[in-house]
Image (cartoon, rainbow, N blue to C red):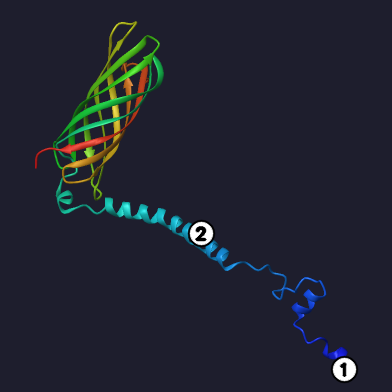
Amino acid sequence: MHRLFRGTGRHPDQQACRDGRRPLNRRSGASRVAPGLLLIGTMKTQRHTMSTCAIPLAATALFCLLLTPGAAVAQADPAQHALAISAGALNFDLSGTGTEFAVAGRARAALSPHVALEAGALVSRLDEQTGRTTLIVPEVHLQYFWRAGRLRPYAGGGVGFGYRNSEFADDRTDLVLSAAGGALIDVSDRLAVTGEFRLRGFDLDLGDPNFPGTSAEWMAGLAWRLGR
């Protein structure tokens, strides 16, 4: 009886192996995970957290940069003498519909610290019902500018002419009214990045509020400040 009570004196896992049974797991049935796997999982979680936080931090830094101009930029008026070139997409509904690549060159003359007069032209090649058509739109705009750090938003409107030279139709010139809104981001006291949306109505008829033809453009480019 005394020997049965004392047992064999072996560790329970040793006794289990001797009897052909699986050693007991003393962690309430939970599986044991290698330390290396735990480290890899922790590193993945940290990388995910860092990437999630990096996006809002980068956006905040960019926003602060735009609202914190340099000394020369802060002293400059929102409306400036400048030359600009831009390119983008032109969506049109004229003698046919579609979207084509377009380029534009423009010059601005500041009339006051916030008001500028812009003159320029847009050029594009359209695929119309009358064949390939060259579209040229010279126009003049009056624009109003604001400043928010390095950002200079603006809005304006103007008038011009739409000249179309088609392969299988006579040349055509229409009166054009347009409105635009955009912004410039000052990279330095001379150079700025531009972005603009412009909407046009072609062939204006004073007795009809609807335009026979329309176009809309999304353009991006560069502007170079002139003068002091």
The percent coordinates of residue 135 (x first, y second) are: 29, 17
Kind of residue at badge 2: Lys
Quick one: quadrant of the N terminus?
Answer: bottom right
**Depicted 160 relative to depicted 78: above or below:** above
* Relative to 228, 150 lies left or right: right
Q: Which residue is mark 2?
A: 44
Residue positioned most to the left: 228
Residue positioned most to the right: 1
Q: Which residue is mark 1?
A: 2
Kind of residue at badge 1: His
**Depicted 192 relative to depicted 49: above or below:** above
If you read the primary sequence from the N terminus, does the residue marked by circle 1 or circle 2 appear first? 1
* Relative to 198, 29 lies left or right: right
- Residue appearing at x 55%, y 62% in the figure: 41
Classify 10 Å Cα crowding around label 1: few (below 14), some (14-19), many (20 and above).
Answer: few
The percent coordinates of residue 100 (x first, y second) are: 36, 23
Q: Nearer the viewer, residue 193 or 172?
A: 193
> What label sits on residue 85 in the rendered view?
none
